[in-house]
Amino acid sequence: MGAAGGYVDYDFRVSNKSTNPYGVDFIVYGNAFNGNPEAGAVKVFGYKTADETKGGKWYDLAGSLYYDTAVTRNNRNLIYGKGSKRLNYKYNGYNNNNFVEFGGSSTLWWPLNPGKDYDTINGINAGMPFEEELVRVNAAHDEITYKDVCLVKDTDTNGDYQFGYFDVHGNGSNYGTAINPYTANNSSQGGDGYDLSWAVDENGEPVVLDHITKVRAYTAAALKTDGSGAFTTASIFGETSAEVCGIYGVNGTGGKAATKLPTVKKGDTVVPTQNMGVETVSVDANTTFTFTTQADNLYVNGEKLTSGSNRNFNVISGSTRYVQVITQSGTEAPYVTVLKLTNR
């Protein structure tokens, strides 16, 4: 799909069902084998009720890195500009190492002539039906802009993308059969499952969706791990580009609503939570929370914890920080709740 922001949209109607195994509603297949992930993220066009006349919206599905402080999301602009063998870019208005140099035999990142340049050099069949249109559009525009992109750190470790990212776990061959996204490891096969209960609004707060009609899969792994905000360049390939082989709805049943919930404490005070809800909590600059549960799996902002773990959160005066808490057991759907930490 190309470098960061490159995407493909699928018309794909899926209902949000807790009776699906692990609560997974659809699966994206992209990685032919385990290892070397080029992580992609997903947006969905969804509706809160069955009545589509009330209008739908695009929502992010919040993966395990979504609330990580090193991740940038929402209200971001990524602008690519033309440049021979050089992919010029601006990220959120700033030039960060402001180009990616294409390697190998690549010459241009946009087609200038039908059947020539980047298409034929990379062995792609010339004369594709859309090629003339691509040439026309690219001749008229010097830049292409992606808005509201979500960029995550680019690493070669599957475990860094536990759930909510595709082109990570190997495809396997049991298409439509969900694996547990909360226990999948580096050797797991079965693609990357998505739960519509991960949907969040532009603030990162949970949204209860009835169903969706579109899936947008896009390249998200782009930033270097050094915190510079600069893009990675993937060796001879010239770019980090997520891959999609297909999307399947989930087969089978066996799931059910979550029965083992988290207990969250700020000091000795229990913080109330609700599934798919947000609880506002007043905090100081540094506040410690304790998380306990009888569930098999406990995640706090994408980090897998053991029951009874403490975590400290820094919240600058006058600001807000979100903390996602997930518990999940067996084939049950997850319990997903978000704490809105405010330091006023």
Image (tube, rainbow, N blue to C red):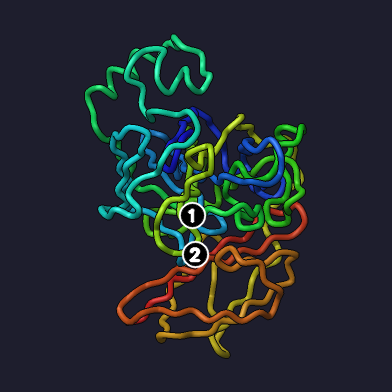
Rendered image quadrant of residue 273? bottom right
Q: Residue at x 22, y 24 (%)?
A: 140
Label 1: which secondary element: strand
**Relative to 111, does residue 2 appear above or below in the rendering?**
below
Q: In the depicted view, which residue is nearer to us: 170 or 141?
A: 141
Residue type beneath disc 2:
Asp
**Relative to 207, does residue 282 appear above or below in the rendering?**
below
Mark 1 is surrounded, within 10 Å at the Cα level, by few (under 14), some (14 to 19) or many (20 or more) other residues, namely many
Q: Are marks 2 and 1 in contact (CB under 8 Å)?
A: yes
**Where residue 296 sits: x, y (%)?**
75, 65
Q: In the depicted view, which residue is nearer to us: 114 or 264?
A: 114
Q: Is residue 96 left or right of residue 175?
A: left
Q: Is residue 309 left or right of residue 205?
A: right
**Relative to 300, does residue 149 appear above or below in the rendering?**
above
Q: Residue at x 63, y 32 (%)?
A: 248
What residue is pinned by disc 2?
68
* Mark nearer the viewer, 2 or 1: 1
Residue type beneath disc 1:
Val
**Where residue 11 sits: x, y (%)?**
49, 27
What residue is pinned by disc 1?
152
**Where residue 112 sits: x, y (%)?**
32, 19
**Where residue 160 sits: x, y (%)?**
61, 58
- Mark number displayed over residue 144: none
Q: Is residue 318 left or right of residue 185?
A: left
Q: CA distance from mark 2 to mark 1?
A: 9 Å
The mark total stands at 2
Label 2: which secondary element: loop
Mark 2 is surrounded, within 10 Å at the Cα level, by few (under 14), some (14 to 19) or many (20 or more) other residues, namely some
Q: Earlier in the sequence, mark 2 or mark 1?
A: 2
